[in-house]
Image (tube, helix red, strand yellow):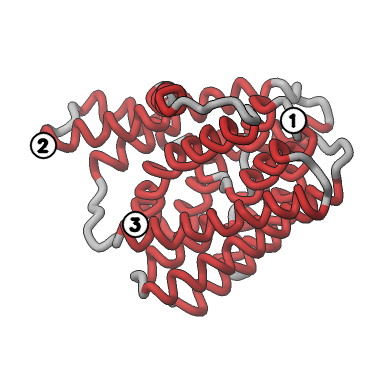
Amino acid sequence: MSPLIETVLFVFGLVALGYLAGLTGYLKAEAGAAIAEFAVGVAMPLLLFRTMVNADFHGAAPWSFWGAYFAAAAITWAAGHLVTKRVFRRDARAGVVGGVSSAFSNLVLLGIPFVLGTFGPDGFEVLSLLISVHLPTMIMASIILFEIFGRGDEHVHPLRIIRRFLHKVFSNPLIIGILAGWVWRFTDLPLPALAVRLVDALANIAGPVALFAMGLGLCRFGISGNVRPALALSALKLLLMPAVALGLVWLLGLPPLSAKVAVVAAALPSGVNSYLIATQFNTGQALASNQMTIATAFAVVTTAFWLTVVVHVFG
């Protein structure tokens, strides 16, 4: 078996084990929320902290890397918004949900273990550059669009948007882990041996725990109606976004590793953030949850396809 295919099957196999554990009743599906809270609130921030402290980001070409990824995200977001509104005749607020569902990659629960398993620590360092700006950028875009489409003709005060953005960003444990890592990095002080052992103990289990929790979470969300639009948005997420990213990284001439990580990150299915945004809008919850479940199922095949493509193109 190809090492790449084996990695894909391993990553999605852990997700499937979590799903089966919830489906069979071996574990309560609600337990996925608690396990995911531990992964996102403790293990993943420590993994990001350790990466920020130890990583060598030289040669990662962050501006071109960010530009290619977020341009692909913006194009796909716009396509998802238009498909939701024009094709499936939903309102503008549901259009925002469709857009974010099409463009918000699951970079944490799925992306971190996937990139670590495929490209190793060097690839994860590149992904960390994206994670450090991905959540703030996508949250800001979501808040702005929510204020515009959710308030109708009501005046949108810029300070309100900025206040909500800052609260969401600086209360997020992933951002706290990244910032803490950068602060410690700038001190040039080594971590005490005991701190290294504690951080390593929790950071090393972040990936498997996150994948298993994701599977349990998918069992809890399930599929209920809105299948056709969810399928269309999944196609945009799994096919259009990585295709656009591939074209952009090739045109911009990104280094091979950065190019591969950008395309693979774009090819990942949507995560729970799209559902949380839909809940905040109080519209499109079923659409977002269905799209997340369907896209994750199909991603077993599409992610392997894009991984094969980038390895063939960039070596």
Residue flagged by tag 3: what amino acid is it? Asp
Secondary structure under the numbered disc 2 in the rendered image: loop
**On-image quarter of the N terminus:** bottom right
Q: Quadrant of the C terminus?
A: bottom left
Q: Quadrant of residue 153?
A: top right
**Label 2 belongs to which residue?**
188
Q: Looking at the rendered structure, which numbered label has been put on residue 283?
A: 1
**Going 18% across and 37% down the picture, which residue do you hit?**
185
Residue 97, relative to residue 125: is it above or below? above
Disc 3/disc 2 C-alpha distance (Å): 21 Å
Kindly report which numbered mark, 1 or 2, lies closer to the viewer in this rendering. 1
- Answer whether residue 79 is visible to the viewer in this image: yes
Q: How far across and down, in percent of the image, does residue 182 sit?
A: 23, 36
Disc 1 residue type (three-letter): Thr
**Could you say where residue 14 lies in the image, as x and y percent from the top left?**
64, 43
* Disc number lying in front (1 or 3): 1
Q: Mark 3 and mark 1 in contact (Cβ < 8 Å)?
A: no
